[in-house]
């Protein structure tokens, strides 16, 4: 139980689960499952939680009987295997942390859990032992859909009554991380704590920034700022006391990683880091970050302390600035715009972005999508719960909100170009430093967004998307098409105020 990092790496190598790279990191390959498998995720429909769950395509119900039969099979399977156990927490704030136990078939999966969750500093109390949520992960056990009631050989099941996450048939380690996030998204709001799919950092003056966005939009990259301390890169809670990280590590996308563009992530990849599906040079074992032979969704999992500029413990005050990140595959949205409170609520509920290649099975190129609260795949409760909590906190703490497009400019995907990262960094820095607070803005047609007319370090024309397109009529057509998608998506939200409805695009 709770083997050291070095011991887990030794076990992984002895069992041929992975290889050491030239950086000292352990590289593992996950086979055909190189991303999350959302169609194979279920929540057990049982008395303690069923009335609170927002059932549907994201939260698919499964009966307790189906779960129990599969759990028994997995338990019998694991009795024949060597098992690795990690005890730790989800939640850096001791007032809101969740005790977790992770039972793994694979040593490198247990190393992943050790690096991604919060490590214990003391033994669990008797109360914590009762509240412990257990992950049982057996990737070598393949389900039979005709017998086991699953959709495929893979399955990810959450039983809130028994406090168990059951995973099988997939070696993708991210399923463990996101399952516990889903659990926290169920538990924390019931404790009056807003759980959020965002990264966070803090400046020298204690000013806190949040970065919301789906995988691949830049949360990890933009929050890793050498001039600010990283609180966390993906999952946070917002309580009456401020922000806290749900995790103890980072799970960074590393396709195209370079020392020049992302030095903090580059330097974090060393002994103790798990590299997932990264191609290596056969002779030198040097990571080939530009190579996507396995997947676009290559990953690096490392503890927060691998980043010197990280805050420990990973807690801070209330946010001064919130950034909504979107990777607009239409190439329509401006690289940065200021949002009114109503616009912020509209875009939070909309959660517009693009699924980027590799983040889910079957996604091979960017697909425009709407993910409520920038985290729909992980929200067991009604989206209104999270949105109302965010709105209340934004208003109470006078938080500024910006929409930042890290997607395409000069045209849609395959025509335009991906937004220049140094420009995005310059715009985000200006927002965090307060340089855009009182600057003159121009209101965008159709979407009504307020675009700063200038930003230090960014060419003026870049700020206005229609100026980057050669064909202005093509731009207008795409803008109208995207606005229509926004309206069609937002129609599903009932009971939203008139002011928030009016904050959306007008066509």
Image: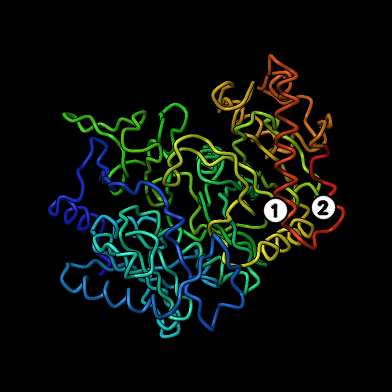
Secondary structure, mark 2, is helix
Say whether marks 2 and 1 touch (CB < 8 Å): yes
Q: Is residue 29 visible?
A: yes
Give SS at disc 1: helix
Q: Where residue 385 sits in the image (x, y, percent)?
A: 68, 66
The image position of residue 393, as x and y in percent, is 73, 60
What residue occupies the far left of the structure in this picture? Answer: 14
What residue is at 83 percent from the left and 39 percent from the top? 506
Q: Nearer the viewer, residue 55 or 34?
A: 55
Q: Residue at x 30, y 65 (%)?
A: 144
Q: Which residue is mark 2?
A: 500
Look at mark 1 in the image and give the residue it sits on: 349
**Is residue 64 toward the left or the right of residue 279 in the image?**
right
Looking at this view, name the residue that lies furthest to the top. 470
Give how far across and how far down residue 123 sits, in percent.
36, 76
Label 2 and label 1: CA atoms lie apart by 10 Å
Locate residue 478 relative to residue 23 in the image: left or right: right
Image coordinates of residue 107 in percent, x first then y, are 23, 58
């Amino acid at each position: 139980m709770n083997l050291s990092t070095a011991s887990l790496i030794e076990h992984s190598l002895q069992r041929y689960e992975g290889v050491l790279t030239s950086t000292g990191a352990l590289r593992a390959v996950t086979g055909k499952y190189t991303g999350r498998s959302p169609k194979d995720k279920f929540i057990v429909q049982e008395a303690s939680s069923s009335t609170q769950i927002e059932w549907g395509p994201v939260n698919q119900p499964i009966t307790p009987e189906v779960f129990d039969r599969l759990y028994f099979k997995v338990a019998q399977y694991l009795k024949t295997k060597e098992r690795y156990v990690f005890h730790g927490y989800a939640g850096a704030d001791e007032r809101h942390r969740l005790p977790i136990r992770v039972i793994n078939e694979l040593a490198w999966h247990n190393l992943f859990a050790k690096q991604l969750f919060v490590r214990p500093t003391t033994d669990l109390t008797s109360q914590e032992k009762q509240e412990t949520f257990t992950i049982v992960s057996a990737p070598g056990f393949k389900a039979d859909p005709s017998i086991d009631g699953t959709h495929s050989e893979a399955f990810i099941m959450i039983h809130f009554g028994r406090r168990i996450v059951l995973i099988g048939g997939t070696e993708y380690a991210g399923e463990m991380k996101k399952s516990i996030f889903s659990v926290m998204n169920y538990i924390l709001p019931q404790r009056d704590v807003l759980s959020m799919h965002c990264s966070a950092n803090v400046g020298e003056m204690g000013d806190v920034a949040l970065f919301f966005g789906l995988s691949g939009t830049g949360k990890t990259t933009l929050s890793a700022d050498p001039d600010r301390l990283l609180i966390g890169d993906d999952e946070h809670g917002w309580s009456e006391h401020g922000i806290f990280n749900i995790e103890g590590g980072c799970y960074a996308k590393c396709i195209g990683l370079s020392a020049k563009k992302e030095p903090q992530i580059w330097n974090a990849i060393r002994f103790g880091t798990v590299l997932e599906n990264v191609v290596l040079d056969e002779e030198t074992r040097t990571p080939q970050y530009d190579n996507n032979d396995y997947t676009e969704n290559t990953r690096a999992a490392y503890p927060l302390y691998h980043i010197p500029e990280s805050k420990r413990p990973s807690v801070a005050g209330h946010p001064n600035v919130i950034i909504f990140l979107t990777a607009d595959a239409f190439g329509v949205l401006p690289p940065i715009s200021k949002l009114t409170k109503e616009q912020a609520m509209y875009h939070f509920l909309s959660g517009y972005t693009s699924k980027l290649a590799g983040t889910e099975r079957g996604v091979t190129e960017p697909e425009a999508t709407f993910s409520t609260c920038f985290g729909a795949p992980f929200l067991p409760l009604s989206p209104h719960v999270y949105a109302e909590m965010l709105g209340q906190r934004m208003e109470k703490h006078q938080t500024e909100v910006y929409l930042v497009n890290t997607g395409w400019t000069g045209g849609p995907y395959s025509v335009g170009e991906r937004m220049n990262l140094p420009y995005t960094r310059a715009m985000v820095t200006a927002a965090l430093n307060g340089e855009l607070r009182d600057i003159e803005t121009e209101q965008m047609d159709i979407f009504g967004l307020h675009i700063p007319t200038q930003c230090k370090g960014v060419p003026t024309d870049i700020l206005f998307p229609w100026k980057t397109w050669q064909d202005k009529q093509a731009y207008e057509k795409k803008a109208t098409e995207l606005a229509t998608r926004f309206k069609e998506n937002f129609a599903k939200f009932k009971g939203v105020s008139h002011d928030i409805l009016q904050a959306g695009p007008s066509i």
